[in-house]
Image (cartoon, rainbow, N blue to C red):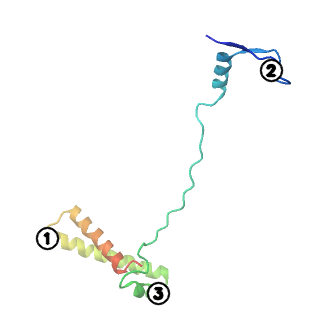
Amino acid sequence: MATSISATGFKGGFGTSSFKVGEDYSMLAKSVPNHVRVAKPVRMAPMMKNVNEGKGLFAPLVVVTRNIVGKKRFNQLRGKAIALHSQVITEFCKSIGADSKQRQGLIRLAKKNGERLGFLA
């Protein structure tokens, strides 16, 4: 059921035209898109940075060594040391009969301790 409204007397406006409110609304609703695209939020690129950088007992020694040896060579040595330490933890877990979840927990604990002590600075 559409209601009829007549608009008269507007200067330069509607004049004496009449329109039906229900029909115009349905036409307007059909002309508007069903969804609106919104641009993706801008995100900062994640930075792989140690939150404890420069902190810890061994951090100054690590920083000086990295500056002397060079970043690339230092990261290679660090990777080898971490791998060796993980192997030691794995062998320890085998000797005491710990399962893989406990081994992973020990490796995570070693990483947290290394960060606190400054080895990962």
- The residue located at (60%, 37%) in the rendering is 36
Mark nearer the viewer, 2 or 1: 2
Mark nearer the viewer, 2 or 3: 2
Task: Please tell me which residue lies in front, 59 or 8.
Answer: 8
Q: Secondary structure at mark 1?
A: helix
- The circle on residue 69 is 3
Residue for badge 2:
14
* Contact? badges 3 and 1 (CB < 8 Å): no
Query: Label 1 sits on what residue type?
Result: Ile
- The residue located at (61%, 10%) in the rendering is 1
Residue 7: x and y in percent read 77, 17
Residue 14: x and y in percent read 80, 20
Residue for badge 1:
96
Residue 72: x and y in percent read 48, 79
Q: Secondary structure at mark 3?
A: helix
* Quarter location, residue 44: bottom right
Q: Which quadrant holds the C terminus?
A: bottom left
* Quarter location, residue 98: bottom left
Left or right: 74 with respect to 82?
right
